[in-house]
Image: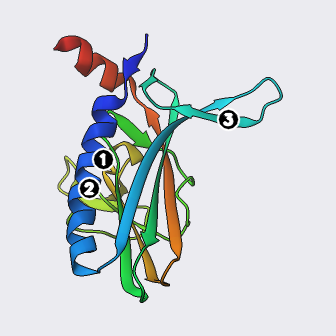
Amino acid sequence: MYFPVRRACTVALFTCSTLFAGLAQAQDGLQVSLTARRVTTDDRGRETFVAADQAKPGEIVEYRAVYHNLGTAAVREVAATLPIPAGTELVRSTARPARMLASVDGVTFAAPPLKRKERLADGREVEREIPLAEYRWLRWPLGAIAAGGSQAVRARVRVSDTAVAARTER
C-alpha cells in the first residue's frame, strides 16, 4: 500500500519555508531549496532517486536543503534547520554533514544521541536514549557561505507503519 508523501513533504516545505524566510530576510540574498526523493536500489545494487510523490512503509526518503547565497557578500553564522516530518523516522548516520544537532521540539537542540531522564517504578531516575522516531528537527552550524556559494545538508527518513495507520483511520 502506497500513501502520498506529498502531505508530509508539503508540511516540511511549509515549515522550512517559514524558518528560512526569517533567515533570508535577516541575511540578504540567502535562498533555500528543499527536495524530497525516494531512495531506491537498481538491479546492480546502486542507489537511485525518484520523486517522493508516494512512499510505502519501510521506504526511505532523502530530504536535501541547499542554501544558496545570491548576494554580493558572505552570509555569516548560517544554521541550516531541517524538519523531520511526522510519520517518518530518522535513519541513523545518514545526516550530512555528520556534525549536527537534533531536537524533539524544535526549541532545544543537542548533539545526538539525544537523551532524557525517566523515573522508574522504584523511584530511581535513569537517563535513556530518545528513539530516532521522536527526532523532529536537525540543525547544522554551517558558518559562512561566500557570495555566490552554496552549501547543502541532507538526511534520510524511513516511512513508518504508524503513518499509514494514522492515514487509514481518517
Q: Label 3, label 1: how many angstroms apart (C-alpha)?
A: 22 Å
User: Which quadrant is the N terminus positioned in?
Assistant: top left
Name the secondary structure under disc 2. helix
Q: Which of marks 1 and 3 precedes in the sequence?
A: 1
* Cα distance in 3D space between marks 1 and 2: 6 Å
Residue position for label 2: 17
Residue type indicated by callout 2: Ser
Residue holding disc 3: 48
**Cβ–Cβ under 8 Å for marks 1 and 2:** yes
In what element is the residue under mark 3? strand
| Residue 89 or residue 117, whichever sits in front | 89
Taking the spot 56% from the left edge, 52% from the top edge, the residue there is: 94
Residue 22 seen: yes
The mark found on residue 104 in the picture is none
Above or below: residue 69 compared with residue 102:
below
Q: Residues within 10 Å of mark 3 (few under 14, many from 20)?
A: few
In the image, what residue type sits under mark 3? Thr
Quadrant assignment, res 6: top left
